Amino acid sequence: MIVQRLDHVNIICRDLGTTARFYAELLDLEERDGPAHMQPDQVRWMYDASGNAILHLNSADFSRRYDRDVTNDETTGAIHHVAFRCNDFDAMIARLEARGAHYKVNDRSSSGLMQIFTADPNNVLLELNFFAD
């Protein structure tokens, strides 16, 4: 079996609407309803500009087939971070500053990469990568 690509990341949210808006506003992801059997107040899907599902957001009370304890208190739990390839570094800095968000820049410009680390409303650590193309 060969992995073709990452399909999506699932995040269990303290506040589903706030989380969906965060990703829509910060990363220009499009918020959509899930399949018909999933209620929009419990599930939101976030898509990139090419129509790929990137994030599957669930409210804490959404019934899951494989359930486990999840805490939003520690940054990302066992997963260290979720990385996104992005463009327009300066626009991202402006968006983060407009939100009053805490972030850290990792300057690897000598190797053609600038990174920004920030957390979403559920304390999921995000690595935003900006490659010099």
Image (tube, rainbow, N blue to C red):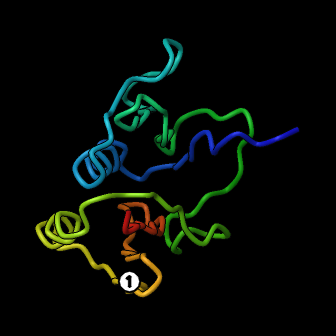
Q: Position of residue 132 (x, y in %)?
A: 37, 68
Identity of the residue drawn at 82% across and 41% down: 2
Residue 76 location, quadrant: bottom right
Q: Residue furthest front?
A: 133
Q: Amino acid at mark 1?
A: Ser
Q: Residue furthest right?
A: 1
State the residue in front, 52 or 63. 52
Identity of the residue drawn at 57% across and 63% down: 71
**Residue at mark 1:** 109
On screen, residue 44 above or below 60 = above
Identity of the residue drawn at 39% across and 23% down: 33
State the residue in front, 67 or 119. 119
Q: Quadrant of the C terminus?
A: bottom left
On screen, residue 107 above or below 6 = below
On screen, residue 22 above or below 115 = above
State the residue in front, 47 or 89. 89
Element type where label 1 sits in the image: helix
On screen, residue 62 versus residue 69, left or right, reads left
Q: Position of residue 75 (x, y in %)?
A: 51, 73
